Image (cartoon, rainbow, N blue to C red):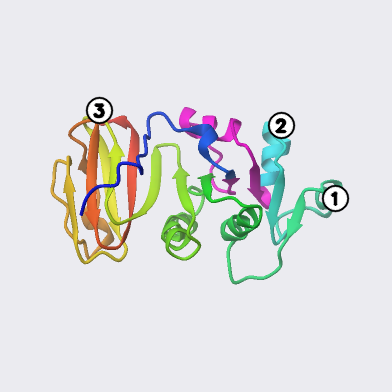
Amino acid sequence: MEANSANIICPSTPVANGFDAVILCDGDFPSHTNALTVLRNAKYLCCCDGAGMRCMEDYGITPDAIVGDGDSLPTEFKQRHKDILHMISEQEFNDMTKATRFCMSRGAKRIAYLGATGKREDHSMGNIALLAYYLDTLHIDATMFTDHGLFTPVSGSHVFRSFARQQVSIFNISCSKLTSDGLRWQCFPYRQLWQGTLNEAEGDSFTLHGDGTYIVFQTYETKK
């Protein structure tokens, strides 16, 4: 398959203004420069429940919306900020997905996620896995920024900007064919999540060719 050069992601210089919305989840508050740049330049900031309260009270940042079931918010806080609070009581989806669907209802198609990892490992794994659902089912162009790198769900062939010795991990979701150009070790359609971890970029770009969906993690910094 021919690589789609229009789908290029550069982890070292995130395009902070390229997202329709930024969703701040209630995991570890971002501290890396790349993640904070995305947060500070958000065109529309939507917080998940408790993240909204922390964002306002601990960091002095007022979001455009707070979305969730409201179970982690004090009554006084909910009353004081009812103009930006959007409570959704159903429990089929977690708060990150509720916030995603809320932003979609406002026309957002390219969404950045912050604070989606940390605190509880099961929540972190669930949130990362949801990226494939957002791509395949909700048709969202999603990027999840952590304090170490970024996760990107992709389908088909894609070219990624990189740098020599950048650490790259590939998590296969539905590919029966998966190959690579520009990585130290050739990819294959991994059957276990751990099999595609700890690969390495050889230069300023690499290409992945798949016939399904997979999630790519790229570090911000080179391996020491």
Q: Nearer the viewer, residue 159 or 194?
A: 159
Question: What residue sits right under mark 2 in the picture?
Answer: 60
* Mark 2 closeness class: few <14, some 14–19, many ≥20 residues within 10 Å: few
Expressed as whole percent of the image width and height from the top left, the position of residue 58 reads 69, 35
* Mark 3 closeness class: few <14, some 14–19, many ≥20 residues within 10 Å: few
Q: Secondary structure at mark 3?
A: loop
Q: What is the total number of numbered labels drawn onto the structure image? A: 3
Q: Nearer the viewer, residue 177 or 65?
A: 177
Q: Nearer the viewer, mark 1 or mark 2?
A: 2
How far apart marks 1 and 3 lie (CA) works out to 48 Å
Expressed as whole percent of the image width and height from the top left, the position of residue 189 reads 20, 61
User: Considering only order in the chain, which callout, 3 or 1, is on the residue closer to the N terminus?
Assistant: 1
Q: Are marks 1 and 3 in contact (CB under 8 Å)?
A: no
Amino acid carrying label 2: it is Gly
Q: Tell me the residue at 26%/38% (across/down).
A: 167
Amino acid carrying label 3: it is Lys
Q: Tell me the residue at 47%/50% (across/down).
A: 142
Q: Tell me the residue at 62%/37% (across/down).
A: 43
Question: What residue sits right under mark 3 in the picture?
Answer: 224
State which region is magenta: 23-50
Q: Secondary structure at mark 2?
A: loop
* Mark 1 closeness class: few <14, some 14–19, many ≥20 residues within 10 Å: few
Question: Compared with residue 183, is residue 128 higher up or lower down, i.e. above or below?
Answer: below
Amino acid carrying label 1: it is Glu
Question: What residue sits right under mark 1 in the picture?
Answer: 76
Expressed as whole percent of the image width and height from the top left, the position of residue 145 reads 46, 41
Q: Secondary structure at mark 1?
A: helix
Q: Tell me the residue at 71%/68% (across/down).
A: 89
How far apart marks 1 and 2 lie (CA) works out to 18 Å
Q: Nearer the viewer, residue 123 or 159?
A: 159
User: Considering only order in the chain, which callout, 2 or 3, is on the residue closer to the N terminus?
Assistant: 2
